[in-house]
Amino acid sequence: MTEFPTIYSITEDELDLNSLLAQITLPSTGAACVFTGLVRGETGRDGLPPRTEYLEYEAYAPMAEAKMRQVADEIRGRWPTVEGIAIVQRVGRLYPRTPTVLIACTAPHRDTGVFDAARYGIDRLKEIVPIWKKEVSPEGEVWVEGEYTPTPGE
Amino acid sequence: MTEFPTIYSITEDELDLNSLLAQITLPSTGAACVFTGLVRGETGRDGLPPRTEYLEYEAYAPMAEAKMRQVADEIRGRWPTVEGIAIVQRVGRLYPRTPTVLIACTAPHRDTGVFDAARYGIDRLKEIVPIWKKEVSPEGEVWVEGEYTPTPGE
Amino acid sequence: MNEITVLFFATMRDRIGERGITLEVPEESRVRDLKRILAERYPGAAEAIGITLVSINREYAFDEDLIPAGAEVAMFPQVSGG
Amino acid sequence: MNEITVLFFATMRDRIGERGITLEVPEESRVRDLKRILAERYPGAAEAIGITLVSINREYAFDEDLIPAGAEVAMFPQVSGG
């Protein structure tokens, strides 16, 4: 059996979509869904200033990488056709238009869950992977509040 | 009103996901879904040889670009929250593990259709954009057969 | 007579043996008329011509559609890009 | 007594004013006991400590969970990555 590539990391480096995709591409791969989140400079989010100068990301890196691994395992449990998985969060000071997070899944075909798998991956990352961000604008700094409380076993 | 970027092209050059994503990222963009198709070296598709040496892609380029534009318009009609759209098909002789096509959509948030929009884009490209591929293996050459017959107005 | 261009792609190009031709067709010719003309000229490709997809000036066209003067017509199989 | 490490992230770090501390807790201490100890030590952060998320050795932990000797405990708000 082929060992499927799984990449998970917290990094301060620029996200390189080309390189990450190549790392999770096998000879049998025919489709890839790459989700990225980016820093919004114009937010309009409730209670936050309308213009973001930058976001400051921090992570509890060793636990974050363990939880990314768990998210990857959950994806494989739900979509057994998924081959490669990459889950990468960039941390540090990130300016608008910058990709901050990437979830990529590959599979032989596009119709066996590669879109749903990537979507699930970003949803779960925002629930259980210990990463936080602070929004910095001319008006000041605001921590972005998470919404999800993990339950035992997560 | 902001003019949303729309990129559509037939190219012989390597697909650069980083550059294409940057070109469709606005200050208000918070999420991007990038789909790529890749050459499968191990196919197992019915009636085709099990190992592909390379695929040879050709396009009726001016019509293909017009139909890509139409696909982008259809996406905007269905998912008005989509901001930037890139639809790019690489042509020529492409070897296994190579990205051949890219559909990318950006939006302020991940939960307003960016995954569905990209999925729709690749489905429609495979229906109406005049591109063909020939599979070349040690056993010989086989044109890959399309399945969809456009109707008037498509 | 109207002068038009006809382009062939993929399996149609293989069967016709040409990438494209120019030819004169009677005014008011429709796609079905052009198919008949080509099937006579390329009898080995007659079956493929019968089921080919057709575009006129880069839009999909169908048997009843009129072919305007100077049209760029193309014939090709169902698409298989991606 | 068991020596443990406690790390603080994001708003918890701001409130506690430390990135991490080591401290001794009685054997058989549970998360709820640690919260009480910390709330006494950092009264200004008592409310935040009451509702913080907790991990033990990089797994989520809850009030009734025992804290093993040498544990790496962390306290932090709900996550907001992405």
Image (cartoon, coloured by chain):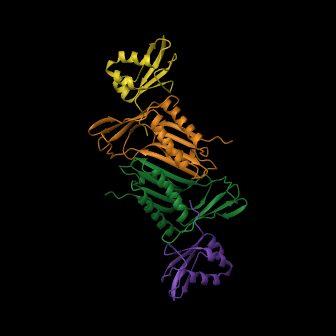
Chain colours: A orange, B green, C purple, D yellow
Depth order, front residue of D50/A114: D50
Q: Is residue A21 visible?
A: yes
User: At 36% from the left edge and 25% from the top edge, which residue is drawn?
Assistant: D48
**A1, above or below B67, in the image:** above
**A16, above or below C6, in the image:** above
Q: Is residue C17 visible?
A: no
Residue occupying the far right of the picture: B139
Q: In this figure, what is the number of numbered marks? A: 0
**C20, above or below D55, in the image:** below
Residue A148: quadrant of the picture? top left
Residue B77: where, in percent of width, then height?
A: 41, 60
Depth order, front residue of D70/A94: D70
Residue A32: where, in percent of width, then height?
A: 55, 50
Residue occupying the far left of the picture: A139
Residue B74: where, in percent of width, then height?
A: 44, 62
User: At 53% from the left edge and 45% from the top edge, which residue is drawn?
Assistant: A117
Residue A98: where, in percent of width, then height?
A: 40, 45
Depth order, front residue of B27/B47: B47
Q: Quadrant of the N terminus of chain A?
A: top right
**B129, above or below B100, in the image:** below
Query: Would you say D13 lies left or right of B138 here?
Result: left
Depth order, front residue of D8/A112: A112
